[in-house]
Each structure stands twice: as C-alpha cells, then as structure tokens.
C-alpha cells in the first residue's frame, strides 16, 4: 500500500452485491451467479484511496481468510491492497492462511511474487454438448 492513505469500512451486503454485479460470471467454479451469491459467503468491505476504490468479500473458515470476490476501480493496485489488508486482518483474527481463486493468469503470477502458491485447479465439464 506504500504511502497511499486508505480508508477501509465494512459495507452492507446489498451495497456490495450491487457493486459486484458482473463479477459472479467470472467465477471459475461457476458456483456464484450474482453479486448476491458472492456476498452471502462472507463480510463485505470497501477500500477508498486517492487512486480509486474497491469492494471485496472475505470469508473466514478453518483458519483461512478466503477472498470470495473483489472488484476495483481507478488506479488502485488491487493485488497489493488486498494482500496487505487481508493479511493484516487475517493475522489479527488468528488465521494461518489466505486463499482465493482466479481465472486470470496474470493475477496468478502477481500473487506468486507476493508469496501465494497454486494449490489446485478448478475443473468443469460442459454437459450441454
């Protein structure tokens, strides 16, 4: 996050669901079909900074803070912001790991440089063919 001042606040599920519209269709697992599906799994937060803003949902299960969904705007570096904010919050809550899933190869590479590692694959089979 460097020297950028950020404001973080928890936001209502309905607000997060509206702001996450369109993100569910990017879910590699296909489990979520709407912003409302994404927010029901965890707590929603908003981050605001000089470079832009973001909304993200985090669920904590079995000592792992799982980033369910995230959507940013402006010049805010979401990888850095989420990694640093979620790491701090997860550590304070006694979590031992952070996880997320993505279909974006570039994000995988950025996260690997920040200490994340690939631990599995999402497999899907199209039954309409």
Image (tube, helix red, strand yellow):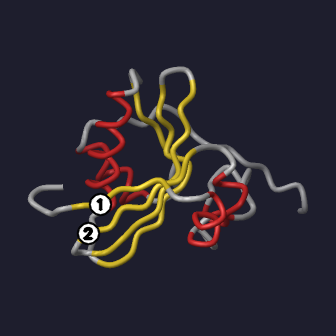
Q: Quadrant of the C terminus?
A: bottom right
For residue 68, above or below residue 26 = above
Q: Nearer the viewer, mark 2 or mark 1?
A: 1
Give the Cα distance between marks 2 and 1: 6 Å
Residue at 42% over, 57% down: 105
Residue placed farthest to the right in the image? 128
Q: Position of residue 45 (x, y in %)?
A: 46, 55
For residue 30, above or below residue 34 = above
40 left or right of 1? Answer: right
Residue at 72% over, 64% down: 34
Q: Position of residue 120 (x, y in %)?
A: 53, 34
For residue 90, above or below residue 41 = above
- Whichever of callouts 2 and 1 sits on the residue coming sooner in the sequence is 1
Q: Position of residue 101 (x, y in %)?
A: 52, 46
110 left or right of 4? Answer: right
Disc tally is 2
Residue at 40% over, 26% down: 93
Where residue 76 sits, quadrant-wise, is bottom left
Query: Which residue is label 1 attached to?
Result: 7
Query: Which residue is label 2 attached to?
Result: 49
Tag 2: Cα neighbours inside 10 Å, few (<14), some, or many (≥20)?
Answer: some
* Contact, mark 2 vs mark 1 (Cβ under 8 Å): yes
């Amino acid at each position: 996050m460097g020297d950028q001042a950020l404001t973080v606040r928890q936001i209502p599920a309905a607000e997060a669901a509206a702001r996450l519209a369109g993100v569910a269709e990017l879910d590699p697992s296909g489990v979520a079909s709407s912003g409302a599906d994404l927010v029901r799994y965890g707590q929603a937060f908003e981050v605001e900074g000089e470079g832009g803003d973001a909304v993200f949902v985090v669920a904590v299960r079995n000592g792992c803070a799982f980033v369910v969904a995230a959507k940013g705007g402006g010049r805010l570096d979401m990888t850095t912001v989420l990694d640093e904010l979620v790491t701090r919050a997860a550590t304070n809550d006694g979590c031992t790991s952070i996880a997320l899933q993505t279909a974006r190869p570039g994000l995988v590479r950025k996260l690997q440089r920040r200490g994340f590692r690939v631990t599995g694959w999402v497999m899907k089979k199209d039954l309409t063919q």
